[in-house]
Amino acid sequence: MPLGWLVVAFFNGCVALSMAEICSAYPTSGGLYYWSAKLAGNKWASLASWVTGSFNIVGQWASTTSVDFSLALLIQVIILLGTGGANGGGYRASKYVALAIYGLILVLHGLINSLPIHWLSWFGKFGAFWNPAGLILLAMLCFYRFNIVGQWATATSVDFSLAQLIQVIILLATGGTNGGGYVASKYVVLAIYGFILILHGLINSLPIHWLSWFGQLGAFWNAAGVLVLVILIPSVAKERSSADFIFTHLNTDNGMGIHNKAYILGVGLLMSNYCMIGYDTSAHMTEETKNADRSGPIGIVTSVVLSNIFGWIYLVTLTSVVTDIPYLLSADNDAGGYAIAQALHTIFNQRYGSGVGGLVCLGVIAVAMFLCGVASITSNSRMGYAFSRDGAMPYSHLWHRVTKHEVPLNIVWLSVLVAFAMALTSLGSQVAFQAMVSIATLGLYISYALPIFFRVTTARKSFVRGPFHLGRYGVIIGWAAVLWVVFITVLFSLPVAYPVGKDVFNYTPVAVGGVLLLSVGSWVFHARFWFKGPIVNVDTY
């Protein structure tokens, strides 16, 4: 609910401020894992850097998977509704079709990230403007190794969510579940996801000035998209929820066997946290920006502030038109249980006798998610570049190579491939897939908290501030950030349905524990003999 969003916004603001302060002192593309090495002290620097980087890069890969796969599913739902809906003979794509769409999305993202750096900068600005609309994801859905694992998981999460959204758009555009709409199989969704990833890879293969263009486009799209939606949705809806429902209602009729309101409130914070990941991107781009010790911190804080504001406005708007929660969540509705798509389709259908307007709204959201995926690939490719430059990845000499336009092309496409591989778990079990992409949230938050923890403990007296700093409040805000991450880590590990069984078991602790075990294990038996921490390169700024 909107009040829960404000709680998450406040504490994420603490995390962002603490990260920005450290970024100002150490502006490098390594970001979090470099910070951990500098702040943990000589004795623990290498281990701290190793584990932080691990969680961050895997978390980013998982995030890309989630977003692009959701986009693939959204495309499928749009097609389904457009061809008659699930109950009207609409086209329902198989899981193979979804996988194919996902693959195409990944390819597009890879191409975008292959562009020169100035193009990537454009995409980044465009994405910053468009990101609040991408917060629709809310309704849909140790150290160095934590960072890179978290980044890969983030890429997976972002692009897979986009693939799912595309699937829903297709479903609704073809008539919906009840109108014979096309219901994509999980293979179709995976195909859509692959296509999205390819697009993201292509974009990220462009020079940096192209990425800059995409960034500006995203910034414009987010602001304009949110503005259009918050005006259009309430004006079209015939029925609106009361203020009491919007701000205080806790849904106990959720079909998950959870009726305790405090528990529901806690679990409800999880998706808000998921929407606010990825703001370390500015840190990873500092080696490609001017005045990095100032622009990096400003980018981190600005992205969180704008996302909090626009996200809350959008959430209130969307909640105001939610009147029948059980129906929106039902697999028998036209969107096949895709709640947000069904809500938008319904309000336009009730007003005009056609859900086309809802499909247009979903299209706006899909573009926002696509641009989010571009930024996700950009972030984890830069993290991977820095990680491999320091010799911390297998065959590191391959991954830190750059083109004449200073684009780390090989690691861009490695990020695309890893994100696609993560989504393959969706073919076997949605439970396994959700455990995989949970790393997108927890992996990144853990990697965020570790350098902050070292800042307020081992480096409390030795930390040298940069131009952006929090003054005497730095330690207090830092502890608030660390304790918040500890709290949500426990929260993410709790059961989300009762009774607990294999089909609803929360495997998040298993996934996070697995990453931690692999990271520490590889350190103990291998990396500690040769990995000495990140290369010191901040003197070039």
Image (tube, helix red, strand yellow):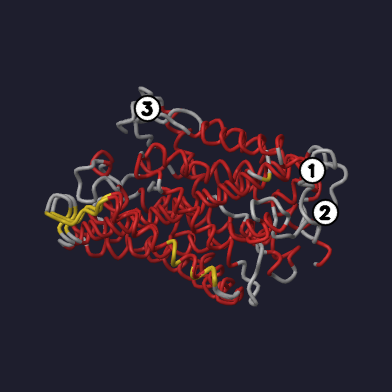
**Which residue is at the front of the view, 289 or 394?**
394
Residue 205 visible to an observer of this rendering: yes
First in residue order: circle 1 vs circle 2: 1
User: x and y percent of residue 300 in the render?
Assistant: 64, 57
| Residue identified by numbered label 1 | 45
Residue 215 visible to an observer of this rendering: no
Which residue does the image show at 34% across and 44% down from the upper left? Answer: 427
| Residue identified by numbered label 3 | 502
Label 2 and label 3: CA atoms lie apart by: 49 Å
Q: Residues within 10 Å of mark 2 (few under 14, many from 20)?
A: some
Helix, strand or loop under label 1:
helix
Q: Could you tell whether 144 is left or right of 77 in the image?
A: right
Outermost residue to the right: 462
Kindly identify the amino acid type of the residue bearing the numbered disc 2.
Arg
Q: Could you tell whether 362 is left or right of 336 in the image?
A: right
- Which label number is shown at residue 465? 2
Which residue does the image show at 36% across and 63% down from the upper left? Answer: 231
